[in-house]
Structures are given as C-alpha cells and as structure tokens.
Image (cartoon, rainbow, N blue to C red):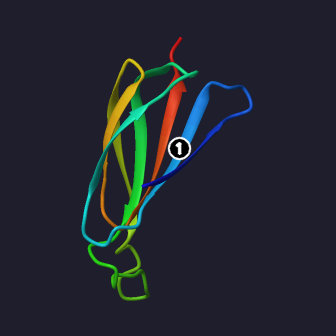
Amino acid sequence: VYKRQALNSSGDTMTMFCVNRHLSRDITTDISISGFKPAGQVAAESLYGSSIYEKNDEVTPDAIHPRSSTVNVNGSQLDFTFRHESVTVLKLHRAK
C-alpha cells in the first residue's frame, strides 16, 4: 500500500491517499499516527471495481463508484483493510 498524507491549511484535518495495487490480495494495515491526535472516527472513501476489466461506460455508467465507510481510531492507532485494486482516501479530524 502506497500512502501520502497532507494537512489542511488550518492543521485540523489530515488526509491520507492510499493505493493497493495488488491484483488479488487485500492488505490489512496498522497505521500509527504521531504529531496529530485524531478524533474517534475516520471517514474512508474507496474506489474499486469487481474486476480490473470493469469500467464505466454508456451501458453501465455507475459500475465503479466511490464507497464510503467509517473506521474507529484507538488513540493514535488506525487499523484498516485496503481492498485489492483500490484507491482509498482517509480523512482524519483532529481531536478537540
């Protein structure tokens, strides 16, 4: 899983962009966050299809679409399973 992260200009939201390029294996990760204390839940939005051959076209315009979920954060630890052949955006808000 390749990850990039960024803070917004006010420093209260961290966004992580994650890609699992493996063709058949989901990857479970334990992400430790330092220097940023996230709130209890993380918004996750993943983009993937049922196969690498699936596509959006005039017959099936919504075959591939973003799927939203939430993930609980335990302190500074985040556990997430990235689906194979997927792109996921995780948005973490700073705890108050």
x, y percentage for residue 18?
Answer: 47, 53
Identify which residue, 21 or 87, lies in the foreground.
Answer: 21
Q: Residue at x 43, y 86 (%)?
A: 57
Q: Position of residue 93 (x, y in %)?
A: 52, 27
Q: Secondary structure at mark 1?
A: strand
Q: Is residue 2 above or below residue 59?
A: above
Residue 41's quadrant in the figure? Answer: top left
Quadrant for residue 66, please give it.
bottom left
Which residue: 36% across, 32% down? 78
Q: Quadrant of the N terminus?
A: bottom left
| Placement of 21 over or under 41, stated as above or below | below
Q: Quick check: 82 left or right of 37?
A: left
Left or right: residue 29 versus residue 9 is left
Q: How many marks?
A: 1
Amino acid type of the residue that numbered disc 1 sits on in the rendered structure: Met
From the image, tell me which residue sits under label 1.
Answer: 16
Closer to the camera, 14 or 58? 14
In the rendered image, the residue lying farthest to the top is: 96
Vertical placement of 44 versus 57: above or below? above
> Viewed as shown, does residue 33 lie left or right of 35?
left
Residue at 26% over, 58% down:
26
Mark 1 closeness class: few <14, some 14–19, many ≥20 residues within 10 Å: some
Residue drawn at (32%, 42%), measured in percent from left and top? Answer: 80
Foreground pick, 57 / 77: 77
- Expressed as whole percent of the image width and height from the top left, the position of residue 46 reads 40, 55
Q: As rendered, which of 54 and 36 lies closer to the eye? A: 36
Relative vertical location of residue 76 with respect to residue 18 in this rendering, above or below: above
Of all residues shown, which one is farthest toward the right?
9
